[in-house]
């Protein structure tokens, strides 16, 4: 076979391969278009149902009640109107908004302390100790964790009423402190990420079980402790149903129940609310923004801890 023949055959093969690749690219191109369309549709839905309402909520306090209805929903009003809405909101019922925020901080902070004091040792014990009824207790924890919270409201209410705690601070703090999801997170972390050789070496050096927990396990568990603290605080801050049932007075309400009272005091949502009330749609929108600010600030300053906590237990030592 001559050199010219070989060169011609090589050229033919290359051209055929190029044609095959081009044909494959043409066949794949419609699927890529479909993928882009699906992604674009999902992003559009995300924009319409999640992003635009948040933007409207942030812009509503800058307008008057009439401008909220008549003007462009995504237009900005004025900073003066924001100041007026702020004054009207915090003047409602002689500063009830401040009282509600303070109550939420007390309920969420107090229950958070009890949650960490109970969940961390409980998860450690379930993961690293053997005792009678351990598997049963773990099963109960898992079942309780997946149950809707509304199913537990009635028995909790009856129990609190039995101990005459209805209408007290403890009627909110004690149920909030029961956090099976936190126990399970700590159990997963200690069961998968805590080096057993380290614990064995510490026992050889003379550490007892309490020293193992406080000096070795607990310092290594800072990421998961931060994760449990964040989820517990956010869940307690946003809880509405239980405080609504067990707290009879407005001065005892957390901010989430207070928002419901603001809603019923807004003539646009409750025509029988009466005239002369300061609360309109801009004040109500501002109240919602103020209510979520503590959680937002907490999230912004704890992102690193949350990420490390979520990755904790992903690998086994």
Image: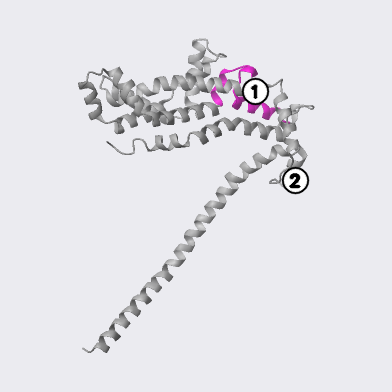
Q: Is residue 217 visible?
A: yes
- Assess whether residue 230 is covered by the magenta stretch: no
**At 50% from the left edge and 14% from the top edge, which residue is drawn?**
160
Could you say where residue 234 lies in the image, as x and y percent from the top left? 51, 30
**At 67% from the left edge and 21% from the top edge, which residue is drawn?**
96
Of labels 1 and 2, the one closer to you? 1
Q: Which residues are magenta?
A: 240-266
Residue located beneath label 2 in the image: 71
Could you say where residue 129 lies in the image, as x and y percent from the top left? 27, 22
- Which residue is more in the foreground, 291 or 140? 291
Residue 200 appears left or right of 255 = left
Q: Which mark is residue 98?
A: 1
Place residue 215 in its image quadrant: top left
**At 58% from the left edge and 49% from the top edge, which residue is drawn?**
47
Quadrant housing the C terminus: top left
- Pointer 1 and pointer 2: residues touching (CB < 8 Å)? no
Task: Determine whether the residue tagged by mark 2 lies in a helix, strand or loop.
Answer: loop
Farthest residue to the right: give it. 276
Q: Is residue 74 above or below residue 158?
A: below
Residue 165 appears left or right of 214 = right
Quadrant housing the N terminus: bottom left
- Which residue is more in the foreground, 229 or 243? 229
Place residue 204 in its image quadrant: top left
**At 22% from the left edge and 29% from the top edge, which residue is drawn?**
197
Q: Residues within 10 Å of mark 1 (few under 14, many from 20)?
A: some
Report the predominant secondary structure element of the magenta stretch. helix
Q: Residues within 10 Å of mark 2 (few under 14, many from 20)?
A: few
């Amino acid at each position: 076979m001559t050199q010219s023949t070989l060169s011609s055959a090589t050229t033919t093969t290359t051209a055929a391969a190029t044609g095959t690749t081009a044909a494959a690219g043409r066949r794949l191109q419609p699927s890529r278009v479909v993928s882009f369309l699906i992604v674009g549709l999902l992003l559009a839905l995300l924009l319409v149902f999640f992003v635009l309402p948040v933007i409207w909520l942030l812009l509503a306090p800058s307008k008057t009640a009439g401008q909220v209805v008549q003007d462009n929903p995504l237009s900005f009003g004025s900073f003066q109107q924001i100041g007026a809405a702020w004054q009207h909101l915090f003047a409602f019922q002689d500063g009830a908004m401040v009282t509600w925020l303070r109550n939420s901080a007390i309920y969420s902070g107090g229950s958070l302390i009890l949650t960490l004091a109970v969940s961390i040792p409980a998860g450690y014990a379930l993961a690293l100790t053997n005792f009678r009824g351990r598997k049963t207790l773990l099963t109960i924890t898992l079942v309780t964790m997946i149950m809707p919270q509304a199913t537990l409201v009635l028995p909790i209410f009856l129990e609190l009423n039995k101990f005459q705690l209805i209408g007290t601070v403890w009627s909110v703090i004690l149920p909030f402190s029961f956090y099976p999801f936190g126990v399970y997170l700590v159990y997963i972390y200690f069961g998968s990420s805590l080096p057993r050789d380290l614990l064995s070496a510490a026992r050889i050096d003379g550490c007892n079980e309490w020293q193992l927990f406080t000096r070795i396990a607990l310092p290594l568990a800072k990421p998961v402790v931060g994760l449990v603290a964040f989820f517990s605080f956010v869940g307690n801050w946003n809880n509405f149903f239980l405080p609504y049932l067990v707290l009879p007075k407005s001065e005892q309400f957390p901010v989430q129940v207070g928002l419901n009272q603001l809603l019923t005091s807004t003539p646009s949502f409750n025509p029988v609310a009466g005239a002369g009330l300061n609360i309109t749609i801009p004040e109500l929108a501002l109240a919602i923004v103020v209510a979520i600010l503590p959680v937002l600030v907490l999230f912004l300053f704890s992102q690193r801890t949350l990420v490390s906590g979520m990755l904790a237990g992903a690998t086994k030592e």
